[in-house]
Image: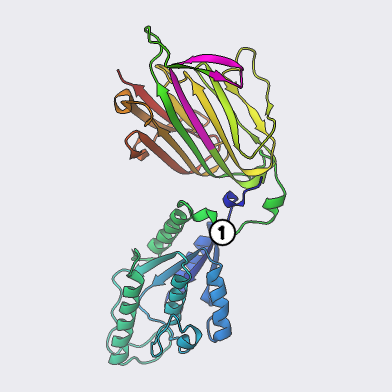
């Protein structure tokens, strides 16, 4: 099963602004977006001088995943035929700019809009000369242009948040950060972006250096917990089909790990172990009839898993159950970036354990690299609700580990 929703995608961004006064800003933003692997479109490639060119711009906006609007001091060239071109968007006697027309069309087509307005815009001065068109501006012309720009800004700010920029450096960094945040938001990748056709039909090897994790989610759900020993009875018994045995259970937690890769792979190798008594395992995606297991040392078969999922896919989801693996001296939960990861998330959920607030306390959260150097990232842990903790890291290098350490309370 090859799921295209999570394949590595390139997102298309349409940049809209007045041109001559913001030419430098557009070029810098364009180059920055290209370096971040975005596809960039804009009016300088096909200025809307007539109906035919406007149709080309509409097509580019329709195919874009995001519309970025930059506003400074100028209103821009007036689209004299705007009403004839788009009667649903422009009034009969309404005078709007080409930039405003692009904005209204993107809004009409429900393209996500990110708007950036220059802070402390310059007021036009009386007797000023237009440095771009080299035309004298009358007082009325200047006042009318300022009114048009202010009206356009008010239209843009209606129903949406906007950002302000003071200089070119701030504009560039704010646009990149806003776009990166938007494309990582929930639901965005399910219907946006461009996917290379070859990645749909030619699976590559798991160890290929081009492969990276577009995202990984590791969800840990505690089912039950009691401290083992001191004469405490087991909470229940459970049969583990993988090893064909039944175990007394004092604590049990389940994990679901969803790995979304940049390419379609021909197979996926999975590894985990427990300090407890046993673990069970199942493949949620893709469907496989039989797993190949690597050789495991004698006596460790119950506690170590190293299967290979031999099925082509770009999404591999596995579920694992751990029995009696969370006791004093072993209260660590971790997940690893097996490949460079754009986004690595880990959620720990204690809500099914009664009195969880009095049983568990977070000691710290660490990011550990292969040399065992540890970086404390506890401050980045978010509480989604009482008993549910989330850590999310971006641009995580290969083999780095996110690790939660907990303390068991009396």
Q: Seen in the image, is 269 located left or right of residue 251?
A: right
Residue 17 in sight = no
Q: Is residue 389 within the magenta segment? A: no
Q: Where is residue 67 in the image (x, y as percent from the top left)?
A: 47, 67
Image coloring type: rainbow
Residue at image mark 1 = 193
**Tally of marks:** 1
| Closer to us: 143 or 391 | 391
Q: Eyeballing the image, is 163 above or below 365?
A: below
Q: Residue furthest right?
A: 202
Q: Where is residue 126 in the image (x, y as percent from the top left)?
A: 27, 88
**Other residues around mark 1 within 10 Å, as few (<14) / some (14–19) / many (≥20):** many
Q: Looking at the rendering, which quadrant does residue 53 occupy?
A: bottom right
Q: Looking at the rendering, which quadrant does residue 146 occupy?
A: bottom left
Q: In which quarter of the image is the N terminus?
A: top right
Residue 179 in sight = yes
Q: Eyeballing the image, is 122 above or below 318?
A: below
Q: Quadrant of the C terminus?
A: top left
Q: Is residue 246 within the magenta segment? A: yes
Q: Is the magenta stretch mostly helix, strand or loop?
A: strand
Q: Position of residue 119 (x, y in %)?
A: 31, 68
- Helix, strand or loop at label 1? It is loop
Q: Residue at x 58, y 17 (%)?
A: 302
Q: Seen in the image, is 353 located left or right of residue 211?
A: left
| Closer to us: 232 or 102 | 232
Q: Seen in the image, is 176 located left or right of residue 52?
A: left
Q: Where is residue 165 in the image (x, y as percent from the top left)?
A: 35, 65
Q: Give the range drawn in magenta.
A: 239-257
Q: Which residue is drawn at 53% across and 56% down?
A: 36
Q: Residue at x 52, y 26 (%)?
A: 321
């Amino acid at each position: 099963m090859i799921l295209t929703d999570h394949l590595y995608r390139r997102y298309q961004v349409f940049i809209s602004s007045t041109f001559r006064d913001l030419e430098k800003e557009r070029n810098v933003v364009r180059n920055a977006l290209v370096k971040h692997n975005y596809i960039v479109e804009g009016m300088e490639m096909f200025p809307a001088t007539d109906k035919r060119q406007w149709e080309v711009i509409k097509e580019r906006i329709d195919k874009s995943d995001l519309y970025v609007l930059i506003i400074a001091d100028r209103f821009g060239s007036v689209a004299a035929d705007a009403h004839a071109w788009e009667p649903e968007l422009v009034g009969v006697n309404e005078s709007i700019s080409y930039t405003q027309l692009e904005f209204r069309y993107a809004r009409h087509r429900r393209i996500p809009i990110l708007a950036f307005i220059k802070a402390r815009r310059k007021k036009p001065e009386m007797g000023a000369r237009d440095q771009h068109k080299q035309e004298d501006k009358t007082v009325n012309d200047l006042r009318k242009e300022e009114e048009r720009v202010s009206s356009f800004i008010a239209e843009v700010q209606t129903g949406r948040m906007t950002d302000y920029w003071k200089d070119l450096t701030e504009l560039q960094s704010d646009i990149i950060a806003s776009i990166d945040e938007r494309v990582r938001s929930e639901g965005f990748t399910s219907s946006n972006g461009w996917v290379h056709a070859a990645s749909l039909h030619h699976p590559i090897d798991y160890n290929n250096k081009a492969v990276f994790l577009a995202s990984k989610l590791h969800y840990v759900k505690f089912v039950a917990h009691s401290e083992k020993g001191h004469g405490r009875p087991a909470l229940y018994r459970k049969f583990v089909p993988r090893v064909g045995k039944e175990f007394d259970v004092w604590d049990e937690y389940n994990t679901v790990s969803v790995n979304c890769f940049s390419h379609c792979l021909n197979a996926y190798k999975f590894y985990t172990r427990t300090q407890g008594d046993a673990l069970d395992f199942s493949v949620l995606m893709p469907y496989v009839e039989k797993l190949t297991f690597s050789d495991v040392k004698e006596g460790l078969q119950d506690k170590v898993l190293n299967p290979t999922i031999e099925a082509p896919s770009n999404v591999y989801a596995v579920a694992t159950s751990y029995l009696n693996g969370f006791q004093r001296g072993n209260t660590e939960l971790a997940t690893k970036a097996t490949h460079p990861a754009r986004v690595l998330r880990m959620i720990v959920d204690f809500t099914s354990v009664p009195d969880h607030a009095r049983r568990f306390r977070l000691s710290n959260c660490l990011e550990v690299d292969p040399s065992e150097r540890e970086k404390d990232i506890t401050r980045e842990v978010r509480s989604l609700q009482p008993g549910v903790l989330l850590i999310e890291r971006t641009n995580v290098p290969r083999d780095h580990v996110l690790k939660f350490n907990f303390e068991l309370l009396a």
